[in-house]
Amino acid sequence: MKLNDQIQSIPQEEFNILKKFVKRSNEVQGIKSKDLIYFTYGFVKIDLPNLLETADFEEIFIYLVPGIKTNNLNIQKAMPFIFWVYDSLKNVITIEKEYLSSTPKLDLMSAGIERLNELGELNTLDAVASRFNYKMEEIKEKPYHEVFDLQRKMKLEADIQEDLARIQKDRSKQKKLH
């Protein structure tokens, strides 16, 4: 039985229990995977979530663990790695929420900015590519951590511009009072 079939045959309740208690490891068959942030942005943000959603674990192993032979990989050896992948992706999402997200201004919300959410990662690819003069495909192929740094720069610059506008507005009000 193929690895994907073995894993998919686990009832969801049992899978959740395993997910809670199985020790995580980024090593399988004596081969260690790099942290997700060193893989391409396209893989981490687009391909990996899709592969997890479709339960294509063999493809995940092939991408993250070069040289692995999935045909002789048993489920007991696979699960620590699979849960490491889930946790690593969750950590990426958590860090993004902490360092890259912001609440849209009321005007933007009123205008319907949330409609862009349906485009998913296309928004990020477009914004970073446009800002730094890349093609979207080039952004997909960059290491995730480099794209994160570019997004962080954009976020910090936007925050600084917003603070500057507020300061200038406050100064303008003070001048009018004097």
Image (tube, grey):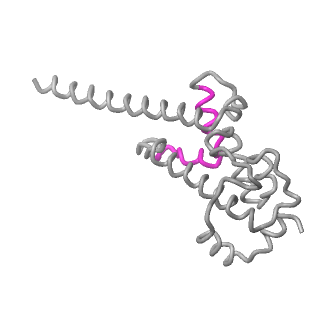
Magenta stretch in the rendered image: 109-130
Q: Is residue 170 above or below residue 25?
A: above
Taking the spot 71% from the left edge, 50% from the top edge, the residue there is 48
Q: x and y percent of residue 65 in the render?
A: 76, 48
What is the x, y in percent for residue 100? 48, 41
Q: State the residue in front, 35 or 54.
A: 35
User: Quadrant of residue 54 in the image?
Assistant: bottom right
Occupied quadrant, residue 40: top right
Q: Is the magenta stretch mostly helix, strand or loop?
A: helix
Horizontal placement of 52 versus 107: left or right? right
Q: How far across and how far down the image is residue 111, in percent?
A: 50, 43
Reply above or below: 7 against 111.
Answer: below
Q: Is residue 81 left or right of residue 74?
A: left
Q: In which quarter of the image is the N terminus?
A: bottom right
Q: How many marks?
A: 0
Identity of the residue drawn at 53% across and 33% down: 149
Q: Residue at x 49, y 31 (%)?
A: 154
Q: Quadrant of the C terminus?
A: top left
Residue 169: x and y in percent read 26, 28
Vertical side of 27 occupied by 104: above or below: above
Q: Nearer the viewer, residue 167 or 78?
A: 78
Which residue is drawn at the image coordinates 39% and 34% (left, top)? 159
Q: Does the magenta stretch include residue 112?
A: yes
Farthest front residue?
30
Residue closest to the far left: 178
Q: Nearer the viewer, residue 176 or 67?
A: 67
Residue 67 among those drawn in magenta? no
